[in-house]
């Protein structure tokens, strides 16, 4: 069911990188802003006369905690009217019109396979939400692989936080990979090489034919730019997975 438009209040803003900000938004009319991890909200920004050109949708980066506050992480887009308004006009205390939660990019029930969360840029937002929800609520699960494609070290949104989470939770693996850094004690290149390597290492002999290696059951969630998603879908199917194992949320 489509949610009504509501008034939110921006209660905190923080710089995550030089071109990325975190916005905490409270919905005062609600005691709790209930949503399912992976969903998004739509903001109605005063940047155009036509509604369709005013609306901007962003995945929720926080997880359900029973409060009426949620978090968005937003990157400044060159020439982007919506993000320029948010970065230049919105302050702590500003009101903003929003609708949500919306969307079906959510976890399967049950979470009975490995989860590959594959993302670029602010596409990490829904996976941060999903990961914390699974771990905080002790949802039964297998291994979670969060594979985050970045250009430089400074692009790894929530990097330190996710490293600390990995150190505390054995079933959670945070794997950033950097396409424009020199090789070192970290992954370099694009996301595709990372999940392909894991999947190939996790194959097991087929029943009745030990010479035939089968892919370990998994769900793949993709969030980011179109080129990454298109290539990932093809590569994942080439690994032996069917389309039903792949879920996507497109940015841009």
Image: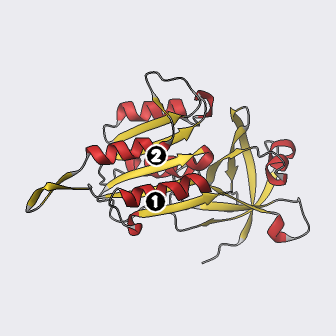
Query: Residue 107 occupies which quadrant of the picture?
Result: bottom left
* Depth order, front residue of 137/38: 38
Which residue is painted at 11% across and 61% down in the image?
207
Which residue is painted at 43% across and 37% down in the image?
174
Q: Is residue 86 left or right of residue 2?
A: right
Q: Is residue 4 left or right of residue 214?
A: right
The residue lying furthest to the front in this view is 211
Instruction: Classify mark 2: helix, strand or loop.
Output: helix
157 vs 219: above or below? above
The residue lying furthest to the left in this view is 208
121 vs 152: above or below? below
Residue position marked by numbered label 2 in the rendering: 192
Which residue is painted at 29% across and 54% down in the image?
140
The residue lying furthest to the bottom in this view is 1
* Depth order, front residue of 82/231: 231
Instruction: Classify mark 1: helix, strand or loop.
Output: helix
Q: What quarter of the picture does the C terminus occupy? A: bottom right
Q: How far apart are the alpha carbons under marks 2 and 1?
A: 10 Å
Residue 234: image tag: 1
Q: Is residue 225 visible?
A: no
184 vs 37: above or below? above
Q: Is residue 242 visible?
A: yes
């Amino acid at each position: 069911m489509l949610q009504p438009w509501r008034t939110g209040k921006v209660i905190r803003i923080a710089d995550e990188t030089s071109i990325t900000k975190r916005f905490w938004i409270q919905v005062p009319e609600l005691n709790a802003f209930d949503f399912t991890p992976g969903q998004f909200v739509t903001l109605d920004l005063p940047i155009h006369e036509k509604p369709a050109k005013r609306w901007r949708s962003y995945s929720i980066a926080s997880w359900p905690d029973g409060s009426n506050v949620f978090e968005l992480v937003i990157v400044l887009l060159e020439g982007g009217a919506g993000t320029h308004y948010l970065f230049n006009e919105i302050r702590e205390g500003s009101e903003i019109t929003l609708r949500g939660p919306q969307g079906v990019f959510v976890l399967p029930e049950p979470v009975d396979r490995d989860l590959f969360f594959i993302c670029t840029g602010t596409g990490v937002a829904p996976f941060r939400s999903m990961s914390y929800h699974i771990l905080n609520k002790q949802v039964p699960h297998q291994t979670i692989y969060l594979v985050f494609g970045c250009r430089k070290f400074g692009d790894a949104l929530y990097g330190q936080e996710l490293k600390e989470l990995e150190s505390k939770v054995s079933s959670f693996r945070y794997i950033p990979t950097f396409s424009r850094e020199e090789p070192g004690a970290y992954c370099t290149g694009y996301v595709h090489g990372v999940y392909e390597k894991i999947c190939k290492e996790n194959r097991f002999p087929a029943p009745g034919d030990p010479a035939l290696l089968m892919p370990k059951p998994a769900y793949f969630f993709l969030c980011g730019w179109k080129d990454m998603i298109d290539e990932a879908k093809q590569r994942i199917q080439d690994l032996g997975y069917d389309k039903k194992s792949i879920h996507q949320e497109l940015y841009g």
